[in-house]
């Protein structure tokens, strides 16, 4: 069952991973939309834990508020119950059909979405088959005195039953698998209804533990949603557990099978949880904010973090982990650029030394991300996941190159400025440097946004800024050359310094703009732009040739 769940989750995330990621990111600010987004995403992934990890990552990056993230998780809790409802129907006849069709599509498809759909169908077939096998394997349990004594003891101590089920759900990282196991055992009359309901409550707590543990080393914004969701579930269990016996007797009086009773209890518990705690989301945000200490200031102590390789079973989560680490790497590189120019203006050589040391930190970030993505690439990734893996590594490589430019060429230029301390840059040169430095800072921020969002409009804007920057840089070089021609006494070393800094800024801007090219190429807009440019150039040549012909005539 767990392997079937894994195959379904991988098939969905590889085939529709980017759409799922975008739908989560698009639920900004609207809690009701966030709730139904979490519900839908969890029905697709069949894992509220995977949804929780994705949501925590987005919250940690500042893409989602903690309140919105909690609304998504409440929706995710309901989404997994709907999947359990569907699987309680007698779908055993579909199992061989789904397995055969899934194997055929997965084996004979060259790749792409069709192969992922084959993996999805195969996973569903295995899940249905596992339910039948569990029923057959559990039949002897009804005659086992030891098993009966265990369940009788659990019926007398429902708190112990909740803890036992929570451990199972935590170990399996899936409340859905645990609830389906409980439903199957109850259908075989191995479990009493009261104990089964207590197991369901425990499964709801257990599935909220893995995201909480996985985010313990993350920043405060990423840790708050999983903790809030865990507290919501614990409070819900505390409220409902004393009435489990009464609820079981009421449902048993209805004309419903044991499986349907348990699935309905699971669904109504989570719906009631959402209705009860949805108005208290803001209070939970404040409570988790008090429980979790504020992040330590990382202005001078930011360090690479260990990337969680257990997330490889859900490649979408692993890619988001890598993205988050690359963003932290980008913060260090941006700080290096700011420090370098402060040092250039103020002749601060201690700051220059610190900037050079920060490049070692950038290299550590890059090595960690590269090793993580290389290990992830060895997993069975889909086409989109492989492409995103390459894009993340390419952007990290560009950031590492920018760090090398700053720590190498720019820092060397700052140190060389000491040799010309008695000379001063002209006002025009200082203005030209500032006019290029500020656009590079803006390009830095925009490139990080393009990297995380993949937005085509922002990618076009970034590329347009690059062309404007090139024109400004060319103009600055021309201005400087004119200054040298007009003032023969201008210090040649100062002139070389000016031209080197202009060149370095141009190289940094080019590395930042590179993130836009694959996005525009996938959207079909990069080739269109190049075609348009070629047609304009051809048209200009025709016009020039016509004018030349007219002039000669």
Image (tube, helix red, strand yellow):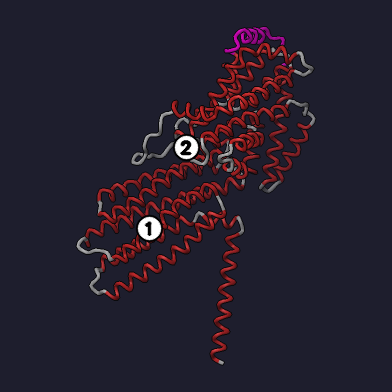
For disc 2, the neighbor class at 10 Å (few under 14, some 14 to 19, many from 20) is: some
- Residue 140 vertical placement versus 290 (above, below): above
Point out the stretch of residues depicted in magenta: 138-160
Residue labelled with disc 1: 437
Residue displayed at 68% across by 44% down: 115
Image quarter for residue 460?
A: bottom right
Image quarter for residue 504?
A: bottom left
Residue displayed at 19% across by 62% down: 422
In the rendered structure, the answer to whether residue 330 lies left or right of residue 480 reads right
Who is closer to the viewer here, 377 or 499? 499
- Residue 489 vertical placement versus 433 (above, below): below
Image quarter for residue 143?
A: top right
Q: Secondary structure at mark 1?
A: helix
Mark sitting earlier along the chain (2/1): 2
Residue displayed at 72% across by 39% down: 103
Q: Is residue 7 visible?
A: no
């Amino acid at each position: 069952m767990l392997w079937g769940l894994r195959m379904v989750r991988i098939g969905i995330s590889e085939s529709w991973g980017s759409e799922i990621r975008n739908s989560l990111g698009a639920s900004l600010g609207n809690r009701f939309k966030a709730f139904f987004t979490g519900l839908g995403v969890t029905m697709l992934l069949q894992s509220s834990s995977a949804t929780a990890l994705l949501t925590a990552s987005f919250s940690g990056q500042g893409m989602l508020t903690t309140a919105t993230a909690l609304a998504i998780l409440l929706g995710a809790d309901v989404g997994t119950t709907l999947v359990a409802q569907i699987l309680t129907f007698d779908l055993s006849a579909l199992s061989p059909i789904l397995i055969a069709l899934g194997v055929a599509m997965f084996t004979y498809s060259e790749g792409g979405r069709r192969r992922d759909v084959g993996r999805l169908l195969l996973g569903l077939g295995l899940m249905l088959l596992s339910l039948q096998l569990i029923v057959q394997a559990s039949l002897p349990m009804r005659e086992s005195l030891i098993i009966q004594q265990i369940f009788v003891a659990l019926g007398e101590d429902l708190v112990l039953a909740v803890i036992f089920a929570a451990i199972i759900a935590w170990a399996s990282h899936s409340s859905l698998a645990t609830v389906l196991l409980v439903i199957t055992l109850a259908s075989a009359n191995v479990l009493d209804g009261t104990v089964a309901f207590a197991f369901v409550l425990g499964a709801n707590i257990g599935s909220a533990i893995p995201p909480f543990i996985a985010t313990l080393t993350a920043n405060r914004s990423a840790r708050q949603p999983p903790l809030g969701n865990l507290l919501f579930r614990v409070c819900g269990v505390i409220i409902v557990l004393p009435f489990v016996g009464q609820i079981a007797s009421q449902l048993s009086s209805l004309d419903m099978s044991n499986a349907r009773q348990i699935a309905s209890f699971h669904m109504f518990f989570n719906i009631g949880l959402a209705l009860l705690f949805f108005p208290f989301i803001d209070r939970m945000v404040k409570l988790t904010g008090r429980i979790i200490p504020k992040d330590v200031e990382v202005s001078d102590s930011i360090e690479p973090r260990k990337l969680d390789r257990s997330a490889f079973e859900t490649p979408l989560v692993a890619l988001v982990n890598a993205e988050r680490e690359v963003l932290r790497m980008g913060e260090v590189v941006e700080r290096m650029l700011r420090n370098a120019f402060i040092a250039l203006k103020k002749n601060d050589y201690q700051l220059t030394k610190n900037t050079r040391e920060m490049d070692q930190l950038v290299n550590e970030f890059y090595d960690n991300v590269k090793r993580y993505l290389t290990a992830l690439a060895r997993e069975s990734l889909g086409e989109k996941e492989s492409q995103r893996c390459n894009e993340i590594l390419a952007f990290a490589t560009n950031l590492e190159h920018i760090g090398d430019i700053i720590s190498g060429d720019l820092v060397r230029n700052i140190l060389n400025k000491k040799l010309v301390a008695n000379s001063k840059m002209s006002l025009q040169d200082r203005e030209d440097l500032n006019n290029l430095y500020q656009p590079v800072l803006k390009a830095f921020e925009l490139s990080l946004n393009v990297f995380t969002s993949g937005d085509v409009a922002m990618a076009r804007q970034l590329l347009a800024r690059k062309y404007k920057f090139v024109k400004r840089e060319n103009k600055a070089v021309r201005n400087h050359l004119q200054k040298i021609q007009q003032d023969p006494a201008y210090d040649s070393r100062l002139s070389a310094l000016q031209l080197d800094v202009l060149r370095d800024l141009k190289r940094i801007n080019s590395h930042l703009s590179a993130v836009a090219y694959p996005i525009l190429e996938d959207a079909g807009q990069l080739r269109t732009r190049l075609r348009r440019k070629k047609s304009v150039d051809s048209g200009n040549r025709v016009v020039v040739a016509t004018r030349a012909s007219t002039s000669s005539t």
